[in-house]
Every structure is written in C-alpha cells, then in structure tokens.
Image (spheres, coloured by chain):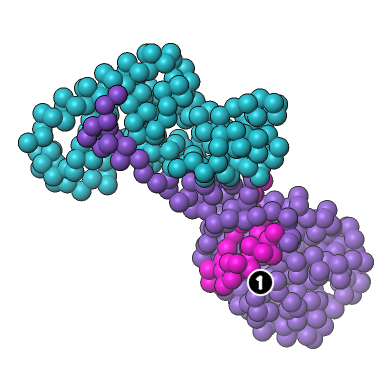
Amino acid sequence: MMSDRLTAELSELAVDAPHGLLPNVLVGTGIADGYVRRHSMLGDVLVAFGNKGVTALELAGDPGGFVTTYEDRYGRRAIAVDRMPPRIATHLDAAIAAGRPGRLPVDLDRLTPFQAAVLRTTAKIPRGEVRPYGWVAKEIGKPAAVRAVGTALATNPVPLIIPCHRVVRSDGTFGDYSLGDPENKRILLAAEGLDVSAFSNLAGRGVRFTGSDTTGIFCHPTCHRARRIGATHRVDFTSEQEARHAGYRPCLVCRPVAD
Amino acid sequence: MRTVTPSDLAAALATDLDGAFPDLVRETSAGVFSGALRLVGNRHDAEEIAQEAFLRAYRALQGYPTDRIRDMNPAAWVWTIAANLCRNHHRTRSRRPVTADLTVDPTDRSPGPEAEAIDRTQEERLAAELQRLTWPMRAAVVLHHVVGLPYEEVAAALGRPVGTVKADAHRGLARLRSRIEEVRP
C-alpha cells in the first residue's frame, strides 16, 4: 500500500471528539449523574439528575462544592453535561419557574421514605400559599413529627422544584430555608404573590384559620379560597376547636385539618 | 495514540465495568466520532451515533460473561456497533428523498455552489467526495484510512471478509484520487 498524499489527507480528516460526548455517555449509562446550569428567581442554579430524574438543586456559586456535597450525599459523581434526557429537558425550566415538579421526574428514591413523603406532600402546596410544618406532619400521618418534618425540609435536595419555601412556622415566622439566605424564602413567596407582611401579622396575632360566614367553611389563611372571602364575611379562628364550635367545617381544598 | 493496550482495557472492563468504561470512551471516542463524522457527513448526526454506540456497548457489556469481555478487543468491538449505526443512518437517509435544504450544511457559509467549488478547502472537498462513494467503499476507506483501524478490525466491524474490505478500500481510494485530481490544478 503506497503511502501518498491522498492517504495522508484522509488521516487528517480525523477530529477530536466533542467535549460533551464523554459526560453524556457516562450519564446515559448511569455510571455518573449529570448536572446542568439553569436560571431561577434566586440566580443561577445547578441541577443534577440521574436515570430516574432530578436529584439535586443548589445555587450555582460553588460548582466544586456542589460536586463534593453530591458525592458525600449520594455516593455518586456528578459531572457537567450539555444535554439532558428529553423528559427532563422538556419540563425542568417550567418546574423551576412554577415551583412545582409538574411532569418533571424527581428522584426521591434515594431519600428515606419519611423524607420522600414530606416532600411529596410539600409539592402539592399551591404557588403563593403557605402551610405550617405541623400541617405537613399531619398530612403524612405523623402528626407528632413536626421537628422531623422541619429537618426533612431543611435537607430538601431539590428546593424550588419541591417548594419547601411554602412551609412556614405556625407563628407566622418563616423559619429556615435550604437554599442560601433565609431571606430567600420571603423573596420567593413575595414573588409568588403572597402578601408576606400581612400573613406574618395575621399569624402573629394568633390567627391560624380563616372562615367564611356565608359558606361555613374554614381554610388556611393563604388558601386561594380564603383569599376570596370579602372583609364583611371573614371570620378568623385561632384553633380548629374554635372553628368547629362555631359550626364551621374544614375546606376540602387546602385541608386545614388532616383526617 | 492508544495508551492502554486492548487486553489491559478488556481485563479492566471484565473486572470493573463502571470503573473502566470511561477509559474505553476516552480512548476511542475521537476515533468513533471522526469515523461517524466522515461516514454520515455532519457533526450532529455523528455525535448522536457516537453516543448511541457507547450506550449500546455499555448495555451489551453488562450482559456479557467476564471471560468473553476479557477476550475481546474493546476498541475494535465498539466499531462493530458504531458501523452498524452509521449504515442504518445511511440507509434511512438514502431511502428518504433528499430535499434541497438538507443537502446544504448549515455551518457552511460559502455563497453558492460555484464559489463553493473554488473556496472549499482541500479537506472539505475530500470529505464531500467521501460522501459520494458507495457505502462499502466509503466504510472501508473511512475505517482504515481516517480511523486507522487495521484491515482485520475493519472487516470484523463491517462483518465482511478481509479481502473484500481491502478491495473496497483500494477501489474507494482510486475513485477519490481520480475525482480529486480532476479539480486539482
């Protein structure tokens, strides 16, 4: 075989592999998890995912720290990738913007069943509304586990997507937040249309539920139904018993009292 | 270019698939991507094919007994998968009627066909001429001369006898040579 100009030119047609190929293959095989950078209300975030869905979200300030924390938490390597599986790519930005998973797959299997239950319940809290820690505890059938609910939410691996910022203390203070500064919780809620100071005042005065004297139904004060009650028909309650004694029943939408 | 011998890599894959598979990808991805690029003619499809080839390779290795993995030449074996994907791509392409806009590479900023013929670098012209070869010739030329696989591995990857592959490569080269010489001053 003579080695000539043409064969030399052919060998020069070899190129480098695109940078994304190796990470995309490692994530596609499940050998490693991938992460991407996205925009959010609180600035850029890093979002990691594995085969079963999104696994982590953190502020983008420190990618090195993100990878280390990720490996400590899950025992898996997270590598930067430039593409996501279609089912994640399609729904990720919408989930971050809306503050709920929607159709985005979120992998809760790596968590304890308790934490997964807390997060699943939290994911149902509508945008612009808040619920106390105790409500989440009741909803998952562990009414005494209020502190454990707090811990589970403080270590929520996917804040913003699972809206732990919508769970607050029953006294109207906002409590800790798992994504950066605690003030971020207030910023997010205000951006979702919650009148943060009005809610704090109300809860600070001991009001836990709001009822309507036309329907005889009581709600969480931030339930979208409660917010439609006109000032003249609005009745505030400090406890479930007080509302029940007054002949009110709990709202079926916001479920102020778990059954 | 290979820093790990095929048998080292095979042994490593047999004992720790997840640990060694990234090395297989690192060792072979430039070759697989280059070959796919020159076989299908555009970067986007080539990247898809390379990625899919490695994913299939991984899934296949998961199911293989360790003895079988130990005995294989992993880099050459990946090419059996990649070559198949390229050929399938080629088949669907040739069955589908090619519309005018599909023939234009969007990254190609040259003004028109005539100017293109003059402006094109030798490299682009050669890459385009490869696309005009029949599949067997193109596959043999690309795998041997661009990727640098020995004829035995080319034959294994394409599932054809070594003699046939050699003949295809020679005929492909001759055809390229006559076409390139035509336009060369």
The relative height of residue A164 versus residue B151 in the rendered view (above or below) is below
| Amino acid at circle 1 | Leu
**Residue A68, percent from left and from top:** 67, 64
User: At 69% across and 40% down in the image, what residue appears?
Assistant: B16
Q: Is residue B181 left or right of residue A112?
A: left
Name the tint of chain A in the rendering: purple
The relative height of residue A248 versus residue A119 in the rendered view (above or below) is below
* Quarter-of-image position of residue A246: bottom right
**Residue B185 seen in the current view:** yes
**Residue A125 seen in the current view:** no
* Quarter-of-image position of residue B115: top left
* Quarter-of-image position of residue A242: bottom right
The relative height of residue A73 versus residue B72 in the rendered view (above or below) is below
**Residue B126, percent from left and from top:** 23, 35
User: At 66% across and 25% down in the image, what residue appears?
Assistant: B68
Residue A64 in magenta stretch: yes
User: At 38% across and 13% down in the image, what residue appears?
Assistant: B163
The residues colored magenta run A42-71
User: At 60% across and 41% down in the image, what residue appears?
Assistant: B21
Identify the residue at the far left of this view.
B185
**Residue A169, percent from left and from top:** 79, 76
Q: Nearer the viewer, residue A144 or B144?
A: B144
Q: Is residue A3 left or right of residue B24?
A: left
Chain under disc 1: A
Residue located beneath label 1 in the image: A179
- Secondary structure under the numbered disc 1 in the rendered image: loop
Quadrant in the picture for the C terminus of chain B:
top left
Crowd band around label 1 with a 10 angstrom C-alpha radius: few (<14), some (14–19), many (20+)? many
Q: Nearer the viewer, residue A228 or A139?
A: A139
Chain identifier of the cyan chain: B
Q: Is residue A122 left or right of residue A65?
A: right
Q: How many marks?
A: 1
